[in-house]
Amino acid sequence: MNNSIYRLDAPNSIECQIWLIDLRNPLKWGEAQSLSDAEQERAKRFRFEIDARRYVASHTALRHILGTTLGVSPQDVAIDLGPHGKPHPLDSSCHFNLSHSDDWALIAIHHSEPIGIDLECYHPFSDWALLAQQNYTPDEYQALASLPAEQQALGFLRCWTRKEACLKALGSGLLIEPHGFEAGVGAEPSRVEIKLPQGGACQMDVVSLALPNAAESDDAPMLLGALALVTPQTAGLCF
């Protein structure tokens, strides 16, 4: 599309469309002109200019990608919100999700099922054990503790992206705690089941994404991402 957006290969186990966006570079699309009035007002409310710029760039990219997918102009993409704030195209079976971290963003689109995506820029940190005790299942915590010391912080963040992708696919807001379901510490695809407050359980396929060199830039940070796709059988349980 342009040199700020990279189309990525979808995981073998999930059919979808994925884009990685470099928010540092101008998108050359008139940016704010394609945003809705509500989006432009939100951009004005950011305290720091860098946050406003990242918001405008990521949502401009989203509108252009959705416009191409839906066959309408970017400014004509109608977006509604679910009961807990998850956006979705109005009057369309298409589902999308957006995540950003620092100067990068990920966008995923599926044509029929709810999808979630999460992106994190990796920065080494030492308090992973406390965070894992608070947010992960006992099995996930033990799996992290069994990793070599130099891999534990990375393993923590990989698991975090998987949990976030699942919760974003479900559209649950803050109703479900991350320690209430098993997303896995490894990068391999897995089937995740999340019990719902209203009864029943939603199932989804989650997979970690290979992103470290996706931007093909020597100064690009190490990026971790995950994608979750709700199964057709339980899609009706999403929020």
Image: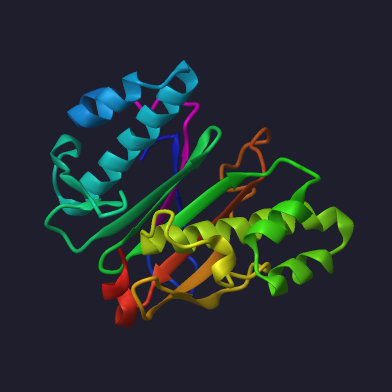
The verdict on residue 19 being magenta is yes
Q: Is residue 10 visible?
A: no
Q: Is residue 185 visible?
A: yes
Left or right of 88 in this view: 191: right
Q: Please name the residue shown 46% across and 63% down the image.
A: 176
Is residue 144 part of the magenta span, yes or no? no
| Front one among 60 and 42 | 42
Return the residue found at the far front.
Answer: 198
In front here: 216 or 137?
A: 137
Picture quadrant of residue 58: top left
- Residue found 50% across the figure and 67% down from its top: 11
Q: Which residues are magenta?
A: 17-30
Q: Residue at x 62, y 72 (%)?
A: 188
- Of 157 and 173, nearer the camera is 173
Q: Position of residue 125 (x, y in %)?
A: 77, 43
Image quadrant containing the C terminus: bottom left
